[in-house]
């Protein structure tokens, strides 16, 4: 493959670089450069407000949601132009973290299943930084089994009444809208009888309870629904076809997470190049060099696998199950790197402060946040099953609940 820019791509890159150089908030560059080791935390700024400002500025100049059609707030850019933009935007792309779920997961689902009126109303506002979306999927009783959800939607006239609970909803505490998958027919097998909606997160009966994390941050939430009313026109897809609709969201989610998830490898390589151990630099240790080489290969594989997925999108394909590979590799790699960094540092790894101590503390933050990355977007076990069955064509797991009505599935063991 030839990764050199064509003359047209080179011109696009030049324009993107010039715009970023002239408009980026340079005062945040240092903090953003360090934030990939853990989660994004700005000392003197609110990431949501800063993200909205950056998104608005990009949208006004035609640099937001590049691959979306122009009528929905995008630029109608090619997949390779999208890659070029991400390269040139660099660390400033982290500022739009609050919009990643909306842009990468919710937006494509609305685009695929929403009415034309809804697409033209909501998508431009999402692209312009006016609204933030979340996805309301996981539930406490379901674990990694999304199809085991119990949140109910009951039809009453032209509306649906929602009761239930979701959990691990990233960004729900600052979101304006959300995608919500519910159970509308418990008499059907669990993958059937599901229906997808979108709703205003400020609707009466919606309660958001933030969850405090081990790394000190508060990014995801419990969400409770008590007699929440959703109009039928906010349904996405047919009644009972929610699982198929959710696959569009999930495939985009895994592609988005796999392509955006920072693994910490560049920071780890630099750290090992400067960390002095009892017998010399960490990078001179044979075992550490072997690990760095392995991570370098994986980092390269993640990069080009992401490019392959983008190429498939350029042909009009929906993101497929192969995108689970990137998310699976990136999540485990993130945790492995953080664990080895902490092993090298010993007790010094728990300190935060200036210079070297600050870097060591960043790996601690990375380690504390890394387990969630192996759960978000599907656990490692779920992703391995997807890869085995849908990519490699291996026999599926034995399922005792297959074709059993959901309300007949036992919920308690003996």
Image: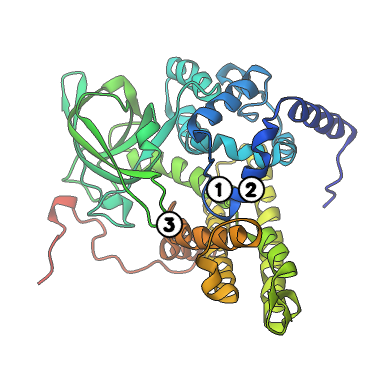
Q: How are the colours assigned in the image?
A: rainbow
Q: Residue 172: x, y in percent? A: 36, 36
Residue 309 disc label: 2
Indicate which disc residue 372 carries. 3
- Which of the marked residues, 3 or 1, is nearer the chain's N terminus? 1
Residue drawn at 48 percent across, 60 percent down:
370
| The C terminus lies in quadrant | bottom left
Residue 199 image point, x, y percent: 32, 27
Residue that appears at 53% across and 33% down: 45
The part of the image, by quadrant, that contains residue 385 is bottom left
**Disc 3 residue crowd, few under 14, some 14–19, many 20+, Cα 10 Å:** some
State the SS at label 1: helix
Provide residue 288's location: percent of width, then percent of height. Answer: 68, 77
Mark 2 or 3: the one toward you: 3
| Closer mark to the observer between disc 3 and disc 1 | 3
Position of 240 relative to 281 (above/below): above
Residue placed under numbered mark 1 in the picture: 255
- Taking the image as shown, residue 13 lies to the left or right of residue 251, namely right
Question: Is the Cβ of the residue at disc 2 closer than 8 Å to that at disc 1?
Answer: yes
Q: CA distance from mark 3 to mark 1?
A: 17 Å
> Circle 2 sits in a helix, a strand or a loop, which is it?
helix
């Amino acid at each position: 493959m030839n990764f050199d820019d064509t003359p047209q791509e080179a011109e696009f890159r030049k324009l993107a670089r010039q715009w970023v150089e002239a408009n980026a908030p340079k005062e945040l560059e240092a903090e953003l450069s360090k934030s990939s080791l853990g989660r994004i935390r700005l000392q003197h700024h609110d990431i949501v407000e800063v993200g909205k400002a950056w998104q608005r500025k990009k949208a006004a100049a035609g640099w937001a949601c590049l691959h979306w059609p122009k009528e929905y707030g995008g630029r109608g850019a090619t997949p390779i132009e999208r890659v070029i933009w991400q390269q040139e935007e660099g660390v400033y792309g982290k500022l739009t973290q609050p919009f990643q779920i909306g842009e990468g997961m919710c937006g494509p689902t609305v685009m695929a299943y929403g009415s034309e009126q809804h697409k033209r109303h909501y998508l431009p506002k999402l692209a312009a930084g006016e609204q933030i979306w979340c996805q309301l999927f996981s539930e406490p009783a379901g674990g990694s089994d999304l199809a085991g959800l119990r949140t109910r939607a009951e039809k009453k006239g032209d509306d649906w009444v929602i009761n239930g609970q979701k959990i691990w909803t990233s960004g729900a505490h600052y979101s304006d809208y959300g995608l919500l998958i519910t159970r509308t027919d418990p008499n059907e097998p669990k993958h059937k009888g599901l229906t997808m909606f979108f709703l205003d997160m400020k609707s009466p009966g919606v309660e958001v309870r933030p969850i405090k994390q081990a790394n000190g941050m508060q990014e995801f939430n419990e969400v409770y629904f008590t007699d929440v009313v959703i109009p039928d026109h906010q349904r996405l897809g047919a009644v009972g076809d929610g699982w198929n609709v959710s696959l569009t969201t999930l495939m985009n989610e895994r592609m988005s997470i796999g392509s955006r998830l920072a693994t910490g490898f560049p920071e780890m390589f630099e750290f090992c190049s400067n960390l002095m151990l009892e017998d010399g630099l960490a990078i001179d240790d044979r075992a550490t060099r072997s690990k760095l080489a392995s991570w370098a290969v994986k980092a390269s594989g993640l990069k080009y696998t992401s490019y392959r997925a983008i190429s498939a999108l350029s042909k009009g394909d929906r993101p497929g199950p192969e995108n689970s590979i990137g998310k699976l590799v990136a999540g485990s790699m993130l945790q492995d790197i953080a664990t080895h960094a902490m092993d090298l540092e010993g007790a010094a790894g728990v300190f935060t402060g200036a210079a070297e101590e600050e870097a060591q503390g960043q790996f601690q933050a990375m380690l504390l946040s890394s387990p969630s990355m192996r759960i978000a977007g599907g656990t490692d076990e779920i992703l391995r099953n997807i890869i085995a069955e849908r990519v490699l064509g291996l026999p599926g797991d034995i399922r005792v609940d297959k074709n059993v009505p959901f309300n007949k599935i036992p919920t308690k063991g003996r």
